[in-house]
């Protein structure tokens, strides 16, 4: 919980200082307000993924997974336990990060239901991704490599910091292939009413990717990939 608090606070401070000189003219203030929802959902997504990834890798390495597998849990129940833990961690993160972005100047969401839907779907999607990676990761280095070289770059190249339409080619086309983008864009649509894609498209992509990740996790757990000798 401390990590997203510190990282979000630093992001807010750096961008506030960087955009400050233009703030009086309105351009800097508008850009700063635009990126605040992106920072918020970024913190929630990273926390959800880290929760399942590190928890499951820790259980595997320390031998605690044997105790978890001892009861006759179905793959769905196994995944649900880690998934609910990740959603709880994301909710706790929201409780401490939201005041930071509110104090920085972000108002209340324009459409709270849309915000809640995309936040929940996005966190579930990343939590399931964490489970899938953790099942095949055999040591901490492999888990860290996924975060450093996969998760973090994908999060940064999702439209968190700027509108996709404002980026030079070929970045917009590349970002459109990133599932992160549709979570961030849908979340920002609910918060500010600004979006690069139709909201329905963001929702369809998020539902499809989440369903795909759920199917992948259940298949891997059913076959005991990485968790059973």
Image (cartoon, helix red, strand yellow):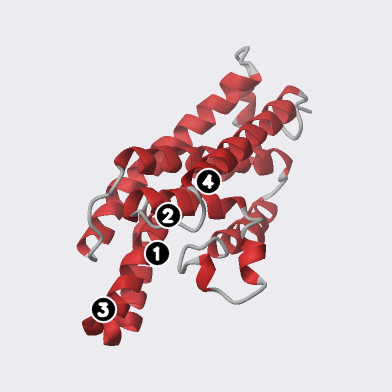
**Which of the two discs, 1 and 4, sits closer to the camera?**
4
Disc 2/disc 4 C-alpha distance (Å): 19 Å
Disc 1/disc 3 C-alpha distance (Å): 26 Å
Residue tagged by mark 4? 202
Report the residue at 53% width, 66% height from top: 164
Report the residue at 67% width, 72% height from top: 170
Q: Are marks 2 and 3 in contact (CB under 8 Å)?
A: no
Q: Are marks 3 and 4 in contact (CB under 8 Å)?
A: no
Closer to the camera, 215 or 159?
Answer: 159
**Which of the two discs, 1 and 3, sits closer to the camera?**
3
* x then y, percent, for residue 165: 53, 68
Report the residue at 36% width, 65% height from top: 34
Disc 2/disc 1 C-alpha distance (Å): 8 Å
Q: Secondary structure at mark 2?
A: helix
Can residue 55 be seen here? no
* x then y, percent, for residue 31: 35, 72
- First along the sequence among labels 2 and 3: 3
Closer to the camera, 134 or 11?
Answer: 11
Residue tagged by mark 3? 26
44 versus 114 height, above or below: below
Q: Secondary structure at mark 1?
A: helix
- First along the sequence among labels 3 and 4: 3
Residue tagged by mark 2? 43
**Which of the two discs, 2 and 3, sits closer to the camera?**
3
156 versus 53 height, above or below: below
Q: Quadrant of the C terminus?
A: top right
Residue tagged by mark 1? 7
Q: Secondary structure at mark 3?
A: loop
Q: Are marks 2 and 1 in contact (CB under 8 Å)?
A: yes
Characterize the local packing of mark 4: few (<14), some (14-19) or many (20 or more) Cα atoms within 10 angstroms.
many
């Amino acid at each position: 919980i401390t990590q997203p608090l510190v990282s979000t606070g630093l992001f807010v401070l750096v961008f506030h200082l960087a955009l400050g000189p233009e703030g009086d003219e309105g351009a800097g203030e508008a850009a700063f307000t635009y990126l605040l929802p992106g920072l918020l959902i970024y913190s929630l997504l990273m926390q959800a993924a880290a929760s399942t990834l590190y928890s499951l890798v820790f259980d595997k390495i320390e031998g605690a997974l044997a105790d978890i597998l001892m009861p006759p849990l179905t793959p769905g129940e196994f995944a649900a336990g880690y998934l609910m833990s990740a959603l709880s961690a994301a909710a706790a993160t929201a409780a401490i990060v939201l005041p930071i972005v509110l104090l920085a100047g972000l108002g209340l969401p324009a459409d709270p239901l849309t915000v809640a839907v995309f936040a929940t779907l996005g966190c579930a999607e990343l939590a399931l991704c964490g489970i899938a990676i953790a099942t095949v990761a055999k040591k901490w280095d492999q888990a860290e490599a996924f975060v450093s070289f996969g998760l973090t770059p994908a999060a940064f190249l999702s439209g968190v910091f700027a509108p996709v339409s404002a980026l030079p080619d070929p970045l917009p086309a590349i970002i459109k292939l990133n599932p992160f983008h549709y979570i961030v864009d849908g979340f920002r649509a609910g918060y500010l009413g600004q979006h690069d894609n139709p909201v329905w498209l963001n929702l369809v992509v998020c539902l499809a990717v989440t369903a795909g990740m759920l199917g992948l996790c259940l298949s891997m757990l059913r076959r005991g990939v990485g968790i059973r000798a």
